Structure formats: structure tokens, C-alpha cells
Image (cartoon, rainbow, N blue to C red):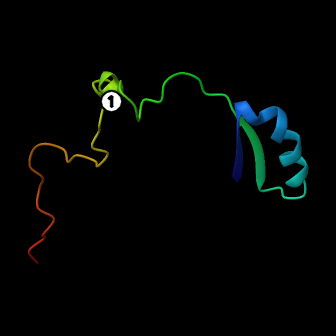
Amino acid sequence: MIYCVIPQALADELYDKMVAYYKDDPNVTVIIDRREGPDRRHGEDAGEHRDQRELRDRRHRRMPGTFPSTYSGD
């Protein structure tokens, strides 16, 4: 799926044109960007949100303890 994202400020001018342009392509969806508020990635108050971000180690941790040997010794 491909998204053609139209800024909200240009939606009145571009949305209908882009929908008509991509009407024959089922892989493209035209959407309007409706996000509001400050961008937390850039700007002066980026440090304000830095403490809210949580980084996680997504690797599986091993179980604690010891495991029996799988060597049969035969």
C-alpha cells in the first residue's frame, strides 16, 4: 500500500485532483494529514519529551539458571 499524504493546508486544492489521478491504481490511497501540535522530533522543546521516550531491548532474554546437558555420552 502506498499513501499519498496531502498536507491539511493544501487539502482543498489537491485532494480531489490526487484522488482522480490515482483512481486506477489500487495500491495508492490518498489521505489528508490531520496531525496537530508540535513536532516532538525537532524544535526547541525536543528536550521536554526526551524523558518520555522508552528504549527497549527487543531481544529475548535467556532464562536464569542452569540447564541439563543434552550430551548423551554413548
- The answer to which image quadrant residue 7 occupies is top right
The residue drawn where x is 39% and y is 31% is: 43
The residue drawn where x is 29% and y is 37% is: 55
Residue 22 is situated, as x and y percent measured from the top left of the image, at 85, 54
**Is the residue 37 above or below the residue 59 in the image?**
above
- The answer to which image quadrant residue 10 occupies is top right
Q: Check disc 1 and give the amino acid type.
A: Arg
Q: Is residue 55 left or right of residue 20?
A: left
**Label 1 crowding class (10 Å Cα cut-off): few <14, some 14-19, many 20+?**
few
The residue drawn where x is 84% and y is 58% is: 25
**Is the residue 29 above or below the residue 51 in the image?**
below
Q: Which residue is identified by label 1?
A: 53
Report the number of discs.
Answer: 1
| Quarter placement of the C terminus | bottom left
Residue 4 is situated, as x and y percent measured from the top left of the image, at 72, 48
**Is the residue 3 above or below the residue 48 in the image?**
below
Residue 64 is situated, as x and y percent measured from the top left of the image, at 13, 42
Q: For this rendering, which residue is in front, 65 or 33?
A: 33
Residue 8 is situated, as x and y percent measured from the top left of the image, at 71, 31
- The answer to which image quadrant residue 52 occupies is top left
Label 1, secondary structure: give it.
loop
Q: For this rendering, which residue is in front, 32 or 54?
A: 32
The residue drawn where x is 35% and y is 24% is: 45
Q: Is residue 44 left or right of residue 25?
A: left
Q: For this rendering, which residue is in front, 62 or 38?
A: 38
